[in-house]
Amino acid sequence: MEQEINGGVTAAMGFKAAGVHGGIKMNKKDVCIILSETPASAAGVFTTNKVVAAPVTIDKEQLAKNGKISTIVCNSGIANACTGDQGIKDGWETIKIMSKELNVGENEVLIFSTGVIGKNLFMDRLAKGISIAAKNLSKENHTAAAEAIMTTDTFSKEYALKIKIGNNDITIGGMAKGSGMIKPNMATMLGFITTDAAISNKLLQETLSAVADKSFNRISVDNDTSTNDSLVVLANGMSRVPELVKGSEDYNLFASALEKVCRTLAKMIVKDGEGATKLIEVNVKGVSTAEFALKAARTIADSYLVKTAIHGADANWGRIISAVGYSGIDYVPEKVTLKLSGLQIMEAGYKVVFKEKEAKEILMKNEVKIEVDLHDGEYEETVWTSDLSKEYITINASYRS
Amino acid sequence: MEQEINGGVTAAMGFKAAGVHGGIKMNKKDVCIILSETPASAAGVFTTNKVVAAPVTIDKEQLAKNGKISTIVCNSGIANACTGDQGIKDGWETIKIMSKELNVGENEVLIFSTGVIGKNLFMDRLAKGISIAAKNLSKENHTAAAEAIMTTDTFSKEYALKIKIGNNDITIGGMAKGSGMIKPNMATMLGFITTDAAISNKLLQETLSAVADKSFNRISVDNDTSTNDSLVVLANGMSRVPELVKGSEDYNLFASALEKVCRTLAKMIVKDGEGATKLIEVNVKGVSTAEFALKAARTIADSYLVKTAIHGADANWGRIISAVGYSGIDYVPEKVTLKLSGLQIMEAGYKVVFKEKEAKEILMKNEVKIEVDLHDGEYEETVWTSDLSKEYITINASYRS
């Protein structure tokens, strides 16, 4: 029933976008607008960092008004983070400019920034970008929009799904940026999702929070959490599908599709991790509680030693088993078994059963799956991460200078 | 009153050591013995990893008997971890061999291993090494002993202090190994401390636990915790200083000297961190609770982005400030100030006040101090870490193969 389609953030009915060069960056696109013809229900999840960029503070305030949102405006190049009162002033000014330019209510606008920390926005260049972008809004410009939010990303990230509900379709599309979990000077993860489903603000927020927890919150590149991380979804109701009600079959289809869109975009971010050469999926099953499963999976995914071993295509099972050991969960170490991309590596009692050559072949691939079974319960969790390469050091040792 | 002296683990009265080649490794020394003429009070702290090497299990049992310990025997090359029942059998066999060789009680022997995980000990080569080492025990062989426990360490680690108590001296000396917080195949951190102080098992254990928390537990290279991590202290009472009593001035002098010995050895481990080029001291002060101070300091020290920035001599204050932000503590971000090695970088309200050139000069040095002041309370904590270099990736991507 699910069908992958093109169109990214404008795939759903009634959405247009633009991505243009306003002059904040030297040559690249740096301003994007996403517009819904009809003001949409909106929900957002934001960074948990105590150091919060001005746009995050302002968007939380906008969403708390519980009205409809029609417009997303985002600049790249400057994060408007650690900018104090001036940053907040510039944020509200951006909303004013945007509102006038498109003749939409000020309460209908959300703003986002990503880029260097500690610098104030160039308001004249941003205004110029907004003015150009407003004239370029179209169904076709979704990729330009996705490009305009990139910082050190090496590719733009878009995805869309169509699902059939009764005789009608609901489309969910989105775009994202991010190539480390944080670069405090190019503050990181942004995700913009649009859909023509009809759904209340409240249920949309509840759904997004749950979905984010299973997608964007399950990835890590380097464990940092940025000052600007934001994920928002706009639902304008322009499909002919009746308003989604919690617990209904239609709602469940929608929630599951939203999760797939978010997870696909999240995995693209991991693939584009700084210096990453491999996508690593970590699955821990047979665990006595869901909390323990997630804790074990995250500890494996966050281990420098596991990430460098996979980078070197080394079936270093000891590092994986040891990471589970210090993850702080309750289990019986002697019962643990391990597979790498389907190949049995270790059986219970630390019995090593693989051939180095076979393991090497599997680990040379672009995607590697680590499967740990604790044989200790019913719960299972999956997270995604990237390998750790010399390129990561090169990018981050010299990034700011 | 404190005086640094030579002699490492044999600096205190009544201790001898040896470090020899038994054949577990190809060419290098791989067996070490430390012997106290008089059986000594003993205490130990061990890895918190659930995956625990056989020697750790056995030593905990030996120490629980609450008797005296005369002999430490340690091999490098094979960790005897993830070796199941055979590993435990080999461990007790090692104790038997050691006991016969030196004619000491089996209850007086502690055993340690460091090296590759998942392989069984070569008992014949270990027995040969023990036999050679037993014949080489001397006051002079402390450095040979320190060398025999090295794995990927690039230098041996020894330190000793003499303190005056009344008309007599107490000496505390030690040696350590470790160059990552873990390499599950060369299982990591070992510390052996000897002293001629007289002190009960119980008070020694209490003191060591507190001291470890302020020294070895305050360092991180890559956040991993090994299967074999062990720190033990033997106190044989051969100084003429009366038994130390908790709370006395003499006891406080002893505890403070023990902490200095442990902290000095711990910092040597960080300096020898895999691929490390710099020792980074992270100090967070003005914090509302000690727990928050430690949490913030650890989060900064564990950030890949901070560690790579310092590696690149980049005064990337945003990464440090952001790490405090996501450390999960309560504070007021706008009040935070930051110094790097004494140079004021940021004042309250994210006001950046440094010259890039001055910061660069400071960050090019071998030791860098990160000083964060939250201006939010009385508490302060310090941890040590190393920078993260391409060399770390090189070592760990190909280590096992």
Image (spheres, coloured by chain):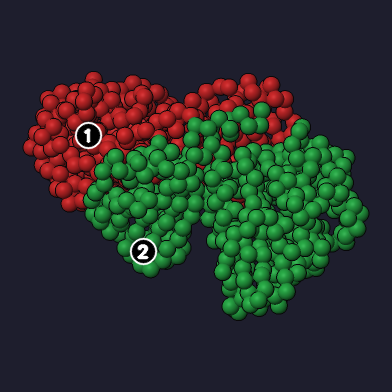
Chain colours: A red, B green
Kindly identify the residue that appears in the image at 40 percent across and 24 percent down: A3
In the picture shown, does residue A282 fall above or below B65?
Answer: above
Measure the alpha-carbon separation of dots 2 and 1: 36 Å
Determine if marks 2 and 1 fall on one subunit: no
At label 2, the amino acid type is Gly
Q: Residue at x 31, y 26 (%)?
A: A8
User: Where is residue A114 drawn, in percent x and y?
Assistant: 27, 37
Q: Which mark is residue A75?
A: 1
Badge 2 vs badge 1, beta-carbon distance below 8 Å: no
Image quadrant assignment for residue A21? top left
For residue B212, side relative to residue B235 (left or right): left
Q: Amino acid at mark 1?
A: Asn
Report the front residue among B15 and B85. Answer: B15
Quarter of the view holding residue A264: top left
Pointer 2 residue: B286
**Protein chain holding label 2:** B
Tell me the number on the disc at residue B4.
none
- Residue extending farthest front: B167
Image position, residue A351 (x, y; %): 76, 37
Q: Give the structural element (helix, strand or loop) at label 1.
A: strand
Residue A241, by quadrant, is top left
The front one of B317 and A324 is B317
- Give percent across and percent down for residue B98: 86, 52
Q: Is residue B188 visible?
A: yes
